[in-house]
Amino acid sequence: MTVIAIHPVQPSIPHTTRTTCPYCGVGCGVRATPHPDGRVDIAGDELHPSNFGRLCVKGSALGETLDLDGRLLQPKRRDEGPGSALQAVSWDEALTATAEGFRRIIDTHGPDSVALYVSGQLLTEDYYVANKLMKGYVGSANIDTNSRLCMSSAVAGHKRAFGEDLVPVDYTDLEQTDLIVLVGSNTAWCHPILFQRMTAAREARPNMKLVVIDPRRTATCEMADMHLPVKPGTDVWLFNGLLRFLAREGLTDAKFVDQHTHGMDETLTAAAGEADSVDVARRCGIEHQALLDFYRLFAKTERVITAFSMGVNQSSAGTDKVNSIINCHLLTGRIGRAGMGPFSITGQPNAMGGREVGGLANMLASHMDLDKPAHRELVQGFWQSPSIADKPGLKAVDLFEAIEAGRVKAVWIMATNPVISMPDADQVKRALSKCELVVCSDIVENTDTSAFAHILLPALGWGEKDGTVTNSERRISRQRAFLPAPGEARADWRIISDVAKRMGYDGFDFTGPADIFDEHARLSAHANSAFVADDANPSKGIARRFDIGALTGMSPASFDAMKPVQWPLPADASHTPIRLFSDGRFSHPDGRARFVPTHPRAPVNSADEDFPLLLNSGRVRDQWHTMTRTGKTARLSEHIAESFVDMHPQDALMHGVREGGLARISTKWGAMVARVRHGGGIARGQLFVPIHWTAQFASDARVGALVNPVVDPVSGEPEFKHTPARVDEFRADWYGFVLSREHIDADKLAHWTRVPGRQFTRVEFAGRGVVEDRSAWARELLGVDAAHLDWLDYEDNTAGVYRAAHVVDGKVIACVFVSPRPDLPSRSWLASLFDKTELEETDRIGILVGQPMRKGADTGPTVCSCFGVGRNTICDAIRQRNLTTPSAVTACVKAGGNCGSCIPEIKRLIAETVVEQAA
Ligand SMILES: Nc1nc2c(c(=O)[nH]1)N[C@H]1C(S)=C(S)[C@@H](COP(=O)(O)OP(=O)(O)OC[C@H]3O[C@@H](n4cnc5c(=O)[nH]c(N)nc54)[C@H](O)[C@@H]3O)O[C@H]1N2
Ligand SMILES: Nc1nc2c(c(=O)[nH]1)N[C@H]1C(S)=C(S)[C@@H](COP(=O)(O)OP(=O)(O)OC[C@H]3O[C@@H](n4cnc5c(=O)[nH]c(N)nc54)[C@H](O)[C@@H]3O)O[C@H]1N2
Ligand code: SF4
Ligand SMILES: [Mo]
């Protein structure tokens, strides 16, 4: 039986710590209460202004992800390269080896021969120190971050339009607006608490409208008034068309445009050259009437917010998509006032903090620009550093190419898993396996990336580390430690500072996060001429809106007590209106915003005969990225246990695959295997695959390997949502699954996925060839020797069906099911048998027959992860009691009553059940 390792919590009276969720950019406040037995109670912080006490299912399940199983607890070294064994070493040896390795390579090949690749999941303090090390001391801007894959198009779009990377909307605006347009954002699943704030506001003010622009009919669409299923990559057409429509309908705010912007005429001319609305609708693949309805709604609604995320940013036209949206807000003057504006929703918990410290390869610290000598001088002067990078460093995709080409010879990867998350991810493997020195700082020992590391540095994780993060609405919140440091793990800022010192640099004698935050805050205020923008006259200082001067000079105790605050927050608050742009001033030298002409263009790679379908990729509700944390908990693995390819039934038919079966999806760059699904609201010609499953969880499910490495020319952000692909049957002679309380070694099977269940591990698999003795095979798989008599099985040789269970003292230890067809018995019903201390006779018969003997025993696949409520339970309640609203379902079966993330799915089930009853 697995023993879960826990933090050494000292027995004491449980103490509650207020902290911030480590997952998405909503930035919810969390109350964490560790208990002496290792349990940690998690609740929403009712005082936090982002979530007011609510948490989504990922946040609620945080307490289940904090055990130490799989954690990296000691520094390790691998001398023989990838594949060789890791040796535990002392911190001294690991830090010295890292510092000497970097120093040697820099001395021989120059500063640009090394790189850091960091993450929006670092705390601001970690990020600040990493950026200072590279740009101020190594003297190279070769530090890029996974935010390149995420936010960089929004950053570039903001810089072009506003002169600075500024997000002018607050969460309260979403509650005051009359129209929210969600573009390329599955907010219901990816920013659930923000989405709940939107839907709650709509309930309170039914006139408020919600429009979703997404090629897929996502869970978010369930709650929307209008869904525009645009063809992938056509957003610039849509928003250019809107711009023209608004101008034609007389909605130009002439005064605002005249006084506060620049470039409207060129932009309108550029947009006008293109097409009329009939043509736009055709190009976007939507009905003309639907397009006009949307345009008219936008036109007549003064208070409108256009919120966008990865369907916009992750595109070869990502930056233009962003500007085409901002253009519409500038034209109508709908910016800088309550309830309106363009709103980039950030993905990671500290995507915004990373932007503040200038973590991208083309930025300098504190919203200053690498390409401006005055800015470089200011930062270098403040740091008193020996050098300052004077040209942009390599952006993520170029960086890994440079590593493969041998131009970059040492890379230090922190808090990100590029072997999964980069496009053309097999290229990343090739690059890392050739690289002279790969250092990884992570909290987990075995990741797809750490497999390539020469040096592994154990970092403190959530609950152990201390510092700040900034959420989507520019709110800085504290992440606080409430657990002791496990093993030898250390804070990322400390590891970076220790390496910097060993490389011979001063400037890294930080005493703790409060000290670093203070330096960061001081830099933000340093020679900041606030809003007297005058770049030509640096003696007045350099104007930037990112100013948190009011937060300087905090003692460690006041840093510890710091409440969530929004920036700008200058020392002299009278200078700055808290609402960005309410004074009509933007950060370009002339104080005006820029319209940016955007010329629509098709994605770089289009479908062809060999690769006739388009691969889109993104997230599912209950997993976080590469699953190193969320993949630990049964609760979060029940909603969707395996990777899948969602496709249209007719495409499935044409490509010879069936729902429930396995498909091989391939592109010019790579291939993977996934379960075929329908029902994800996918149009003909498109595929959707989730990003989460790694080689740690499945034999062959890395979608990153398939994604084209095409990037946006301005931002360098990869086109994750659009790769030509094909789908073929994955030939399997039999399918099966195991639920087992013991570890199962599945490596010999043709395909497998392994996820945790509540009291067992679940392995889904497929195999090839004839198995002569299925019973012997099953016993070997489950590790039950032949002499063991506690074994029930059933075999139908003709049908190729096999079912077995290992039952000891009436308790099920493991069960296995095999069939030539993928329609196998209900996992949720079998999972429920693991809760029983003694199986009943009907359960044993059920196992052998392959279905429950008692009505109601199969609750169906989990919909509500918080209360473990299955689809069948919900549908039965809807039918039997004629339930018509999600709240009626909640009242009846609890589903949806805690975090509410499943409400859109409940709504869909109500609609489907009503249709089914009417039929
Ligand atoms: N559950 C969960 N939540 C998360 C995360 C997670 O891993 N799991 N990760 C966090 C992070 S880092 C991020 S960046 C965010 C991402 O949050 P989202 O951006 O909401 O999530 P995605 O699923 O990546 O993609 C959003 C949508 O873009 C659509 N799309 C694809 N192509 C186009 C197009 O051409 N035009 C338009 N208009 N739409 C298109 C896709 O169909 C998809 O539904 O989520 C954050 N929240
Ligand atoms: N195909 C496809 N690919 C994508 C996307 C997509 O939509 N489609 N989206 C992209 C986007 S938006 C993003 S943000 C990326 C995310 O992709 P990644 O950043 O690669 O994914 P994570 O799993 O979040 O990786 C975080 C790593 O940091 C470790 N970690 C956790 N906490 C700490 C800590 O405190 N310190 C340290 N040192 N390590 C820690 C975790 O164990 C994990 O290994 O994926 C990108 N890749
Ligand atoms: S919405 Fe969920 S994942 Fe995002 S911060 Fe809040 S609790 Fe965490
Ligand atoms: Mo992201």
Image: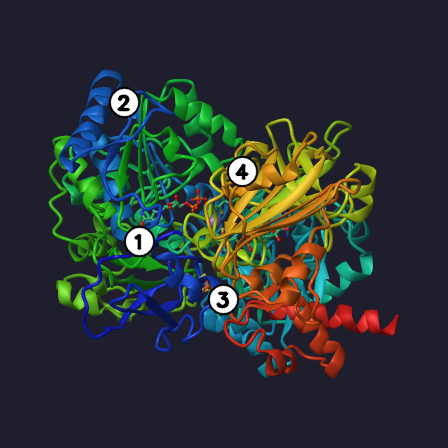
Q: Nearer the viewer, residue 180 or 53?
A: 53
Mark number displayed over residue 654: none
Mark 2–mark 1 contact, CB under 8 Å?
no
Residue 845, by quadrant, is bottom right
Dot 4 beta carbon under 8 Å from ligand 2: no
Up/down of 527 relative to 306, above or below: above
Q: At x 70% / y 34%, what residue is drawn?
A: 730
2 or 1: tag closer to the N-terminus: 1
Q: Is residue 471 left or right of residue 886?
A: left
Q: Which residue is mark 1?
A: 5
Q: Which residue is mark 3?
A: 837
Q: Amino acid at mark 3?
A: Thr
| Element assignment for label 2 | loop
Q: Amino acid at mark 1?
A: Ala
| Residue at numbered disc 4 | 780
Instruction: Report how many numbered discs are placed on residues in the image.
Output: 4
